[in-house]
Amino acid sequence: IACTIFGTVLVVLVGYRFRQKVAHQFLDRFEVGVVLGFLTSIFWAVNTFAVSRGMKGLTPHVANSVRMAIALVLCPGIGFILTRKWQGGIPLRRLKPFSWAFVLEAYGGSFFFMYGFAHTPLAIASALSSLAPVIAVPVAWIRREEPISAWKALGVCLAVSGAVLLVVS
């Protein structure tokens, strides 16, 4: 678990150098990013526990609907608290070309996520779920949206190796 966490932290912290500037100065500070990252980890741990325990006896579709409904309230609310501005939504004309991806993720990715958490030991499920930012890095390299970094590559290798060790042990 430590190897996976350290690798993920390495990927995220090395990525700080390549981040885009944000409009709100408070959110642009490194320390604030680390605190928000830590809070995200806490929310993710609560999500992991809730899904693994709360989904028992529910279909993945019902459990995922509840989870997404909570996210629809939490995400804009937290955004408003942090920026003191109502962000509104993304206009439908911008979302329409990507609607297939939202449907695929909602009914594919989230279904497997919910099913996996309900049928996997909590330690393994949480370590595997933490790989999301790590797996995004090679995709960004392939799309040439992020520079290749030896430190980030090391972080990806550590995180994936930790997850593999956890699953096979």
Image (cartoon, grey):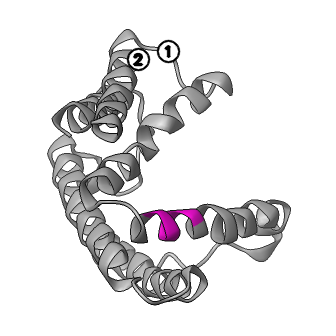
User: What whole-number distance in Å separates the C-alpha atoms at marks 1 and 2?
Assistant: 8 Å
- Residue 67 at x, y percent in the picture: 46, 82
Q: Are marks 1 and 2 in contact (CB under 8 Å)?
A: yes
- Residue at image location 53% in from the left, 80% down from the top: 64
Q: Amino acid at mark 2?
A: Ala
Quadrant position of the N terminus in the picture: top left
Q: Amino acid at mark 1?
A: Ile
Q: Which residue is mark 1?
A: 148
- Element type where label 2 sits in the image: helix
Q: Which residue is mark 2?
A: 153
Task: State the residue in front, 69 or 96.
Answer: 69
| Crowd tier of the residue under label 1, counting other residues whose Cα lies within 10 Å: few below 14, some 14–19, many 20 or above | some
- Residue 112 at x, y percent in the picture: 57, 63
- Residue 168 at x, y percent in the picture: 34, 35
Boundaries of the magenta span: 112-116
Whether residue 97 is situated above or below residue 139 in the rendered picture: below
